Structure formats: structure tokens, C-alpha cells
Amino acid sequence: MRKAGIVLLLSLAQITNAQTSNTDYSDAFRLLDQWIAAGRDYGHLPGISVAVVKDQETIWSKAYGYSNLANKVPATTNTLYSICSISKLFTAIAIMQLYEEGKLRLDDPVTSVLTDFSLKQQFKDSGPITIRSLLTHSSGLPRESDYPYWTGPDFPFPTESQVNSKLSSQQTLYPASTYFQYSNLGLTLLGEIVEKVSGKKYKEYVEEKILKPLQLNATHPYLPKEEYGKKLAIGYSALSREGNREPVALFDARGITAAAGYSSNVTDLARFASWQFRLLEKGGTEVLKTSTLKEMQRVHWIDPDWTTSWGLGFSVSKQGTTTLVGHGGSCPGYRSTLQMDPKEKLAYTVMINAGGESPEFYAREIREVISKIPKEKQALKPEVDLNKFAGLYSSQPWSSEFLVTPWYGDLAILELPSANPDESMTLLRHVEGNKFRRVRSDKTLGEEHIFETDSNGNVVRVIRHSNYSMKIK
């Protein structure tokens, strides 16, 4: 998943006041706001939705671009997107609820529950395909049911009965519990297990047992057709060589719903993350037992090459010294991600209504920029209002533009667009008047940057290395 349309949920006034748990996020969010806006414009993205969660609070969220380009419908924080494979988290929770009730065991063979399961096990020495191995994508099953449902323009998703009718003509790729093989088919079968064990239709079960109790009122095990182009964003294609994105037909996941059929917005996924942080900290039972959620978010499978690890339904990965849990989603016309840091109780969710883009890229860079916030408040109190110098400046013809923005007592310069804002920032320290000097990596001061003003005192350009760049916004 890559860039495309983003929704971040906060106004500039809210960004300025974004301070929680003694951490001042305001300068970081201001920089990120401009960085994402530039990414959306330069990447020709339709729309993007983003939310950042700290424990029980959504500390930043905002929307960029459009959910419907033709009708110029703005993307908002309440815009619905297909969340595709993030759907798997809800299916996994449903399975674990039934596990808590003693209605199934994780090491039960699939055939003990789905007695008509007829997919061929081609490895005679393989162990059983179990519920646990479906949750961890280590079952050896093929990735998909044997239908071309990811193929446009119509995306012919099969019904549940059609999925099952093709099982006898499919076979395992590997012996069970040998390799990680991501499998929409596996999670589809878990949806069938939910139905078989609970005695309820899958959609009815998750609405009653998960979505309503968590008050996820904008999350649905379907894409609401009546809202397409309104509350539900239109999905668009990846960029063509000519720089165009075409509308993608709305799809119905039908029999694959448990693996890829949900819709939601960043507001609801932020609430979903807060529930997990709350349950992990306070203990007890809220939809799940604390111990069950912990079990889901620890590593249950790691590939022989030690690079891919998975929990029970959750992706579990190490990013530097941080362990992230969550899931991503990629469906025709939509990309999404939910990444959670349970230790720090921080979560990041990004939704984009276009193909060929990476919400994980945006989530990662948001996380990295936040990590650059000084741990202790700086003693720096410049004698000038740093907002006076903030804005966009031209870098033409050498590059596109650069941002100047306050950064915790200094100014930060960031070229736009930028792939790594956390690494690309240049800090400037105020010296006197409109004069600043670059802060070197060893904290000593380098060359001067002098901001020039017009007769009204408004900054019009900055001079560096005896050359100047004009302020454009």
C-alpha cells in the first residue's frame, strides 16, 4: 500500500493546542500537516484520512483532498473507505470470543468444525490445518479462493457456496506450519467457522458481538452502496504513465467478507485502537478478556528466515526498538493501515482512496517525526515570533519548494515533497533580528539564514549562501 488520498483529523487551531501527557505535539503536527498536503498534491492523490491516537484520545486527525473527484466532495474524518484486510482483525476477535466461551480450541483441525472441507493436502507427512494456523497464515493454504475476484473491471467475488465448491479442486502449497503464506482463503474459512460454531450469520455475529459493543457505528462488514460517492469514498486506480487515476468500480466481497469486506473511517479505527489500549491497561473483560487480547498480539508464528512474524490475526513486527501490532488493507481503489504501539499507547491509521500508494509509508513517517519531539522542553525562548517566518518558499528550478515551520524553539526547513521528513529536517537557531544559523549535527552553529521583510514587516524571502528563495505562501 502506498500514498493516494489522506484524511488527517485536526484543524490548525487544534494542532496549535495539541498537547497531552506532558508532550507538546503541536510543532510536529504542523510540520506533518504541510508534509502530507504536499504528498497529496505532488502524488496526485484523490484523498487521504489520518488519525493519531494517544491512549484514549485522538490527538490529531485531518482529511485532505476529495472522496469524489468528479463532484468535488471533500474527504473528511468521517469519510468511509474500504479497509479490506483490516477486516481480518474483527474475524480474529470473533474466533477468540468463541475460544473464550469454550466453543472451539485453537488447535482444533479445521475438518473437525468444517466437516465438508475438501481442499487436498498434497503432503502426506503434513500436520493438521488448525484454527491457529489459519489465524497465523501458516496453514499452507493458497492465498485465494479459485476465482479472479481481484481482476477488474467487475471484481467477481464468489459467494460462500461458490468458495466451498472450488475447494476440492485446490490443494495446499506447503505442509502445515512450515512457511508464512498470507491467505485470504484461510480467513474466509475462519468466517465460516464463526457461523458454524455460533449458529449466527457472520455479519449478524460481528455486528452484535463486536461492532455495537465497541460503538464502532461507522464500521460495517460491507461497503454501503447507497453511500458510494457520498459518505463512502470512490476508489481510484494507481497512477497511469500519463499521470491519471481512473475511478474503480465498487465491489462486494460477498463470500470473502471475513477476509476483506469491511468499510470504516479513521475516527472509528482510532476508537478501536483506544479500546485495545484501555483493555490492556485496565484488565478485565470488554468484548474480550485482557489475557486473550495479549495472546493475540504476541508472536505465534515466525518464518524460518526470521523476517516475518504474526500473532493471532494481528501482524506483529519490530521497527527499531518498537513493537507494532495491527494490519494493513489493500483492495481495488483503496489502501489503509492501522499500526499500534501498545507500550507507548500510540496508534496511527491512514486511509487512501487510490491504488499504488502506501498508507504504511505515511504512518511510519508520522511515527518517526513524533519520535523526534524533544523529550524535555527546550529552554530556548527566541526573542521573535517564529510564526513570522513560517511558510512555503520556492526552490525552483533546483527542486519544488521548501517548508519553514517552528520546531520546539528553533525553525525547521523541510524540502517538499520529501520521502523522509524525520531525516530531512534542517534546524535553524535564532541569533538576532531576522537572522538564524543552521544547527549542525554536533549542535554547533553553521551558516546564516537571513529573512528579509517588506515595508509592512512581512517576510518575503530568505537568503542563504548569498542566494535567495522567495516566499510563495
Image: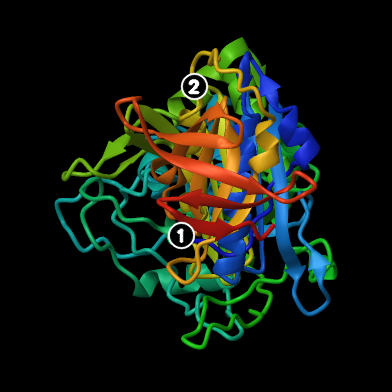
Viewer-side residue, 343 vs 139: 343
User: Foreground residue, 285 or 440?
Assistant: 440
- Look at 43% across and 55% down and name the residue there: 419
Residue carrying label 1: 184
Relative to 92, 49 lies left or right: right
Image location (x, y in percent) of residue 377 = 55, 14
- Which residue does the image show at 59% across and 26% down from the upper left? 101
Q: Secondary structure at mark 2?
A: loop
What is the three-letter code of the residue carrying label 2? Pro
Residue under label 2, please give it: 374
**Number of the front mark, 1 or 2:** 2
Decide: few, some or many residues near mark 1? Use Cα within 10 Å; few <14, some 14-19, many ≥20.
Answer: many
The residue located at (59%, 31%) in the rendering is 97
For residue 304, side relative to residue 129 (left or right): left
**Colour option used:** rainbow
Based on the displayed image, in which of its 4 quarters is residue 288 positioned? top right
Against 96, residue 364 (above or below) is below
**Does residue 462 appear left or right of residue 296 in this picture?**
right
Q: Amino acid at mark 1?
A: Asn
- Choose top left, top right, bottom left or bottom right for residue 216: top right
Q: How many marks?
A: 2
